[in-house]
Amino acid sequence: MTAHQWTYITAALFMLVVIVELLRRGKLREKYAVVWGVTSLVFLVFAFAPSIPTRVSNFLGFELPSNFVLALVNFLLLGMLLQLGLAVGRLEDQNQSLGEHIALLNARLDSTNLDRPDSD
């Protein structure tokens, strides 16, 4: 194995350890950990079998395997951005709904306090 392969293997394993630790501490949700875990495993496979990116890049018409890997990384990042964008949109809807609910509760509380005589 070359020094580059050892570097890739070490980086991918380190990433997997970080993902597991973040999951264990509750800092990372499972649905996001899956994407990061799959990404780390793909690069771990590429490190053990460097001919895979070369063969796939030749099959898909990329001039260099590095161009294929860069395109793959860009695709994965776009997928992560889409996933996070959907989550942000869902949270915005929830925040608006909660704000409206709180406003209704405050209005009801104010009307209840106006109807009740002061106990002073």
Image (cartoon, grey):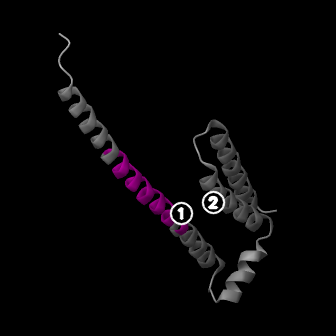
Q: Residue 1, image x and y in percent? A: 82, 62
Q: Residue 45, image x and y in percent? A: 77, 65
Q: Are marks 2 and 1 in contact (CB under 8 Å)?
A: yes
Residue 3 location, quadrant:
bottom right
Number of other residues with Cα within 10 Å of mark 2, as a class: few under 14, some 14 to 19, many 20 or more: some
Q: Residue 15, image x and y in percent? A: 66, 51
Secondary structure beneath label 2: helix
Does the magenta-highlighted stretch encompass residue 41?
no
Looking at the image, the residue that sits furthest to the top is 120
Query: Is residue 93 or residue 12 the one in the foreground?
Result: 93
Q: Residue 51, image x and y in percent? A: 78, 76
- Determine the residue positioned at 24% across, 30% down: 112
* Dominant secondary structure (helix, strand or loop) of the stretch shown in magenta: helix
- Determine the residue positioned at 70% across, 64% down: 43
Q: Which residue is mark 2?
A: 35
Query: Is residue 35 or residue 43 the one in the foreground?
Result: 35
Instruction: Report the amino acid beneath label 1.
Output: Met
Please tell me whether residue 2 is drawn above or below residue 106 in the rendered image: below
Secondary structure beneath label 1: helix
Please tell me whether residue 101 is drawn above or below residue 72 in the rendered image: above
Query: Is residue 112 or residue 35 the one in the foreground?
Result: 112
Point out the stretch of residues depicted in magenta.
Answer: 79-99
Residue 48 image label: none
Q: Which residue is mark 1?
A: 80
Residue 37 location, quadrant:
bottom right
